[in-house]
Amino acid sequence: MVTVATNTRRSGFTLVEVTIAATLCCVVLLGVLGVVHKEAKSFADQATIVNHEADAIQALRRIEGELTYAKGVVPSAWSINSLGVNANGGLEVDNLLGFPSRGDLLLGRGTAVEERLTYATYDVAASTFETLTRDNECTNPSNHPANETVLWAPMAIPSGNQVAPAANQFDGRSNELMGPLFFQGDGTGFTFQVPTDPAGGTNFLDGETVRWGSDVAGQPLASGYSALFYDPLTSVTEVDARHDLNNDGDMDDTFDLGYIKLLRWDSAAPDAATTNVNLTGPYILQERCNRGSDLDGDGFEDPLFLWMPDSNTLHVRIFVFAGQINGHVVTRMIDTAVFLQNGVS
């Protein structure tokens, strides 16, 4: 009798084997998904950076267009009355020409009582700045005498002494095409006018004189002015960003992130309708309490706007807080020099 052996083992996998295989598959799948997610986030971050850079470049093109036929204006006045340490309105000056309908003032520059303050409007009939906010930009309220120079704080222009100016004669030194240049002001704004026909046409001449003004809320006005200025929205510290944003070797600084804006107003009626346009998103970088400071670590200050009347040139430097890639902050500097063929008033 012949006995035939029968293999009773079933084909396939045991439950333990299936469990192990499923676990391995899950591990591999999770790893793949992690890589895909990381790459997708990196791609999105790069897209954000590219978009912010493109937006800043577009803003420069818009600025160049606005200034094609413009002439610069340097707002400056003398105070008529004294301003007490607790006063919050009624700073009378000898003129209001070129001062935006709202903005920042600089009093006592280069002295122990230097103060930056904001005004919400001005009274044309009384020639006074109204609704003042004191202790702006890390300065303290001080007593200011009559006959003191009142400046529109954002405006930056070259200092009179370019050889060896005293410390109270300049606010920074920038690196320009012709070499280092000492300048006064914060460098975050520029005021100008353009040829204007109050009748709404294209007749910009009154005899042989150009009619200057601005198109305010759709209305061409001889009393109209325009300004480019920086308007902060939020802030970021170097500690939060985990990055030395201005490359000065420490992590102690705080920076504002804000817009570059275009404002047009009627100097004869500052409370009337204005044109107020955001030229960029809220990612333009400026150091808090140190506007126009060195942002790239080259040892020279970087004013956002620097007006050089001798050459009729406005140098614009835009530092963009572009975004982050893999936890690393990315900043970009985009600049241009705009020639204003009509100079300054």
Image (cartoon, rainbow, N blue to C red):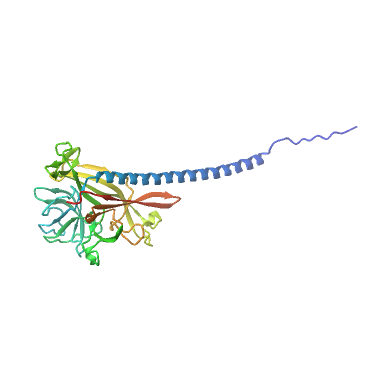
- Which of 94 and 341 lies nearest the eye of the viewer? 341
Check the image and name the residue furthest to the top: 1
* Residue at figure coordinates x 22%, y 41% from the top left: 275
Q: Quadrant of residue 279?
A: top left
Residue 341 left/right relative to 285: left
Q: Residue at x 26, y 46 (%)?
A: 261
Question: Which residue is more in the foreground, 193 or 217?
Answer: 193
- x%, y% of residue 178? 29, 59
Residue at the spot 83% in from the left edge and 35% down from the top edge: 5
In the image, 219 versus 283, the foreground residue is 219
Residue at the left extreme?
Answer: 125
Look at the picture and state if 59 lies above or below 94. above
Residues 119 and 147: in front is: 147
Percent position (x, y) of residue 158? 23, 59
| Residue 84 x %, y % | 14, 59
Residue furthest out toward the right: 1
Relative horizontal placement of residue 305, taking residue 273 as reference (left or right): right
Q: Look at the image and tell me in which quarter the N terminus lies.
A: top right
Total numbered badges shown on the rendered structure: 0
Quadrant in the rendering for residue 287? bottom left
- Residue 221 vertical placement versus 132 (above, below): above
Q: Give percent across and percent down for residue 41.
A: 46, 45
Image quadrant in which you'd find residue 308: bottom left
